[in-house]
Image: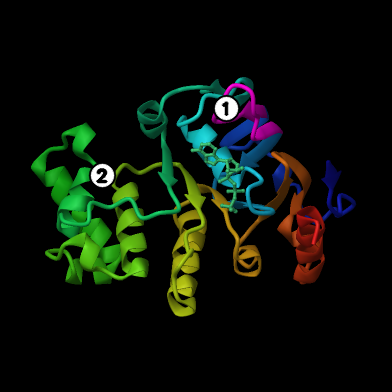
């Protein structure tokens, strides 16, 4: 595993305590095949960590293992100092993790507002609390206020992404695991979605672990980069160590891809 540009003295935040971390994670879908093979990564409050790498290398699998859909066969997942390895998704949610999968996860036939309310169903909030949270969501995403009475399935891909993010914010998570948020979305909407993801970290102080194929766009908002190959970290480093040299990073990614 290579540390990228580790000589830089310009910052030391990557040495600060992460909010979420995994160490030497091994996990897979069947007993005999490990997809993640000794993978370690971190996400810091107010920062975006981005996981890039070739197709099929285990990026989405990492998020699934962190959120508890897959139980690691070895390694540790920690929330601050607390060991949360192998906890089921509902406990991960309660612990402050939000997971946004690659495919939209809204109920298409229910209205936008009902989808938002479902973000809090498990908490059984008082009416006033629910109303306040809805108002906060509408203030942050004006397009959602406009479309709140429509079935969610009638919204564009980008609008559905906004509803998903608004729904996740209802539980005020501290950590976001986000899988390819702009897959299948037009360039203009992509820009908006990256802005929203950036604001989750910069404005709201969330720790974000982002998996992305659109390497150049993702790098523009990223603080720390993991290049993953064959289920392990091939190379990592703080984004600012690369200066404006996105090409060096892309070259490293291509090397990991074997292209
Ligand atoms: N539900 C599943 N059951 C069995 N194998 C799976 C399952 N989901 C993914 N895999 C396999 O795990 C490996 C890693 O898949 P994963 O989706 O994590 O890769 P990825 O790096 O996110 O790829 P991409 O960039 O194409 O989304 C692949 O070989 C894939 O076929």
Mark 2 residue crowding within 10 angstroms, few (<14) / some (14–19) / many (20+): some
| Label 1, label 2: how far apart the Cα atoms are | 24 Å
Q: Determine the residue positioned at 12% across, 38% down.
A: 126
Residue 135 spot, x, y in % from top left: 20, 58
Asked if residue 34 is among those painted magenta in the image, a careful observer would answer yes
Residue 199 spot, x, y in % from top left: 47, 61
Q: Residue furthest bottom?
A: 188
Q: Does 235 sit left or right of 65 as displayed? A: right
Q: Quadrant of residue 242?
A: bottom right
Residue that numbered label 1 is attached to? 78
Q: Quadrant of the C terminus?
A: bottom right
Q: Determine the residue positioned at 11% across, 45% down.
A: 128
Q: Does 8 sit left or right of 86 as displayed? A: right
Mark 1 residue crowding within 10 angstroms, few (<14) / some (14–19) / many (20+): some
In front: 214, or 35? 35
Q: In which quarter of the image is residue 148?
A: bottom left
Q: Is mark 2 on a helix, strand or loop?
A: loop
Residue that numbered label 2 is attached to? 119
Earlier sequence position, callout 1 versus callout 2:
1
Q: Residue furthest left?
A: 127
Report if residue 139 is visible in the image: yes
For residue 69, above or below residue 139: above
- Quadrant location of ligand 1? top right
Residue 2 spot, x, y in % from top left: 85, 45
Residue 30 spot, x, y in % from top left: 56, 26
Q: Is mark 1 on a helix, strand or loop?
A: strand
Q: Give the range drawn in magenta.
A: 25-38
Q: Determine the residue positioned at 74% across, 46% down.
A: 229
Q: Does 66 sit left or right of 189 as displayed? A: right
Q: Determine the residue positioned at 45% across, 67% down.
A: 184
């Amino acid at each position: 595993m290579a540390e990228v540009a580790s000589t830089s003295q310009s910052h030391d935040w990557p040495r600060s305590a992460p909010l979420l971390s995994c160490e030497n994670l091994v996990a897979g879908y069947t007993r005999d095949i490990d997809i993640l093979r000794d993978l370690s990564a971190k996400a810091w409050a107010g920062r975006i960590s981005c996981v890039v790498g070739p197709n099929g290398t285990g990026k989405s699998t990492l998020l699934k293992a962190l959120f508890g859909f897959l139980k690691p066969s070895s390694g540790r997942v920690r929330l601050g100092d607390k060991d949360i390895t192998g906890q089921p998704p509902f406990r991960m949610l309660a612990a402050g993790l939000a997971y946004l999968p690659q495919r939209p996860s809204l109920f298409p036939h229910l209205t936008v507002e009902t989808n938002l309310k479902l973000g809090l169903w498990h908490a059984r909030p008082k009416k006033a609390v629910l109303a306040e949270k809805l108002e906060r969501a509408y203030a942050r995403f004006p397009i959602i206020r406009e479309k709140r009475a429509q079935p969610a399935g009638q919204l564009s891909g980008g609008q559905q992404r906004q509803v998903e993010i608004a729904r996740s914010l209802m539980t005020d998570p501290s950590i976001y695991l986000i899988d390819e948020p702009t897959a299948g979305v037009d360039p203009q909407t992509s820009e908006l979605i990256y802005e929203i993801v950036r604001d989750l970290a910069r404005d709201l102080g969330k720790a974000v672990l982002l998996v992305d194929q659109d390497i150049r766009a993702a790098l523009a908002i990223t603080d720390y980069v993991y290049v993953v190959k064959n289920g392990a970290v091939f190379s990592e480093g703080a984004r600012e160590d690369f200066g404006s040299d996105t090409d060096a990073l892309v070259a490293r990614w291509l090397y990991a891809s074997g292209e």
